[in-house]
Amino acid sequence: MKPEILFNDIPECLNRENVYIRNKDDVLRKIKKIQEDGPEKLQVVTDFDRTVTKQHVDGKDVLSSFGIFFRSQKIPETLKKEEQSLFNTYRPIEVAHDIVLEEKIKAMEEWMMKTEQMLKGIQMDVDEIDKISQLYSVELRNNTQELIKKLDAAGIPVLVFSAGLGDVVQAILKCHDVLLSNVKVISNFLNFNCGKLDGFKNDKLIHVFNKNEHSIDQSYYKTIEERSNVILMGDMTGDAAMADGHKHIDTILKIGFLYDADLQHAKDSLQSYMEAFDIVLFDDQTMDVILDIIGKMI
């Protein structure tokens, strides 16, 4: 007979008031499996905007990668207003609880296509990305540097799977000294052509509801094909599916970061987050839980 699983065996950080767990026994099994198999079997898959970065600082929302990009003075004010109009139209659809997934996907595709069309022809070179990323660099979650560096030292790969703007994602990671050899970014990257933007490089644009559909290049796949355990992190329920397209996965521990300045909306979201993620962290702007989980391994 297998010994009884005791929730007290879970790291102390998971007993905090802002931590919500759907199935305590299942979470403990996953954590034990990940810890027992060791770093050689582990990979980390994470969203970027409001997951690697903080969701807010003192109640003020943190800029997204696209938000940073549209702070550039190279972008005409008319296009900035157009971008804000698109955000006001499509963001409520993205986060709504009463809209079916098929409608959300259609709306996200429209949003990305309209954004791409808007970008074409803007006078800009690649150096501008580094400039605005340094100027408006956002805060990473507390202890993100410690986490990434520990994972790097242990040889654990980190896949940053972002529906944002990959050029800015990489620049921000670089600003914070965490664009290390173990970090791979899959995102929407800009196409620069003779000093002008020509939309995106991607054949298929990435949004929050189709991340799992995007193939990983063969060279990177070789680094993870023997890694059957995943710690996954995201701030939206769609992020919970990021590792669904990966082969040879045995255990996925899904961690969701939930925050909304509208407390009632956040409470209304909790149930859907608990259905999507194994662990939901309410207004936790740190990487402490993940550090505790891997602490016995590395």
Image: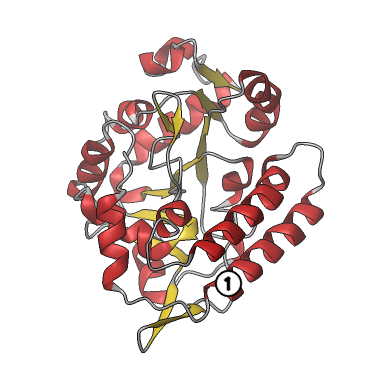
**In the foreground, 37 or 79:** 79
Label 1 element class: helix
Residue located at (35% from left, 35% from top): 36
Q: Is residue 204 above or below residue 147?
A: below
Residue located at (42% from left, 75% from top): 218
Give the x, y percent position of residue 208. Answer: 60, 53
Q: Is residue 79 above or below residue 208?
A: below
Which residue does the numbered mark 1 point to in the structure image? 118
Q: Is residue 131 visible?
A: yes
Identify the image's colour scheme: rainbow, by chain, secondary structure or one colour.
Answer: secondary structure
Q: Is residue 208 above or below residue 6?
A: below
User: Which amino acid type is shown beneath numbered disc 1?
Assistant: Met
Taking 258 as reference, is 284 left or right?
left
Give the x, y percent position of residue 124. Answer: 37, 76
Q: Is residue 3 above or below residue 242?
A: above
Q: Image quadrant of residue 276? A: top right
Q: Is residue 173 visible?
A: no
Taking 184 as reference, is 233 left or right?
right
**In the foreground, 80 or 68:** 80
Q: Image quadrant of residue 269? A: top right
Residue located at (65% from left, 69% from top): 114
Q: How many marks?
A: 1
In the rendered image, the quadrant that contains the N terminus is top right
Dot 1, crowdedness within 10 Å: few (<14), some or many (≥20)?
some
**In the foreground, 140 or 126:** 126
Q: Residue furthest bottom?
A: 194
Give the x, y percent position of residue 163. Answer: 53, 57
Taking 81 as reference, is 126 left or right?
left
Residue located at (36% from left, 41% from top): 37
